[in-house]
Amino acid sequence: MIRTMQELLEEAKKGEPGKLAVAVAQDSYVLDAVMQARDLGIVDPILVGDAAEIASVLDELGRADADVRIVDEADKTEACQVAARLVRDGEADFIMKGIVDTSVIMRAILNKENELRTGNMISDVLALEIEGYDRLFLVTDPAMTIAPSLEQKVDLINNAVMVAHALGNENPKVAALAAVEKVNEKMPCTVEAAKLAEMNRAGEIEGCVVDGPLQFDNVVSEEAAKHKGIDSPVAGKADVLLVPDIEAGNMLVKAAEFFGHAKKAGVIVGAKAPVALTSRASSAESKLYTIAIARLVARLAR
């Protein structure tokens, strides 16, 4: 099982490089990460965007002589459509978001003409490596699903479990997070968390162990769970953190990154091909890890 970002890179290096279509590639952090991934043998990139700007950035990075395919498309919206069509036509295995709004690239993914929709829910899964822990944490959904229903939470779990499986975790422990450990009718997320655990025990959610409602401290600290008398197979051992809504997820991952200096990697799943996606302000290092995790998901999908 992959437990660190370095192990993630090592696993992504195995086998043939994946074909990566980079949408709106003219950004130094993006191209730095892409070229590093290329050097490591993780990807064979296709850079879609303003060719002159891409060439200028490559020159700034000392990569002016790089033998890499560039598709010239200055319009950012159309560049995303081109990247999606490259996947549709079998020229690329997955997509990376460059210097463009997430909403723009997602419209390309959802465009029926690009044939990337599967009917499954599309969601964001973000991996965190936090110092002092012996595993990666997967958080869902901190970026796409605003206020998931019970049915949507089932899909969020299934998508996150698929990512966990791509990382070699065959039976991840999923924590349905809430502010309390007991079901409270005034707090719908606690009712839904208990229902999700019940569905897992009944075999309606497979490939993982689900429990909830559970507070954050109880799922990441065995000591805290023991002190509170929490009896759960997920207590202190969670691999997947299912947040109740986008606000909780966004604040959790941003706090981990800026307060805890966590390393992160994000991937959008649910379409025919994963999308390597982080904030436009994320570092080249974070974008490299993101390429790697998307590569492993794409490999599993194939």
Image (tube, rainbow, N blue to C red):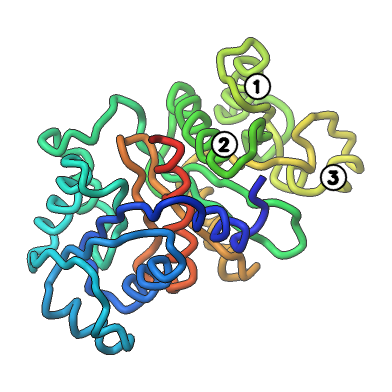
Residue at which label 3 appears: 222
Numbered disc 2: secondary structure: helix
Circle 2 crowding by C-alpha within 10 Å: few under 14, some 14–19, many from 20: many
84 or 65: nearer the viewer: 65
Mark whose residue sits in front, 2 or 1:
2
Quadrant placement of the N terminus: top right
Quadrant placement of the C terminus: top left
Residue at which label 2 appears: 165
Q: Quadrant of residue 109?
A: top left
Whether residue 103 is visible, yes or no, is yes
Circle 1 crowding by C-alpha within 10 Å: few under 14, some 14–19, many from 20: many
Q: Residue at x 23, y 36 (%)?
A: 116
Q: What's the CA distance linking mark 2 and mark 1?
A: 19 Å
Q: Residue at x 45, y 54 (%)?
A: 266
Q: Position of residue 135 (x, y in %)?
A: 70, 51
Residue at which label 1 appears: 197
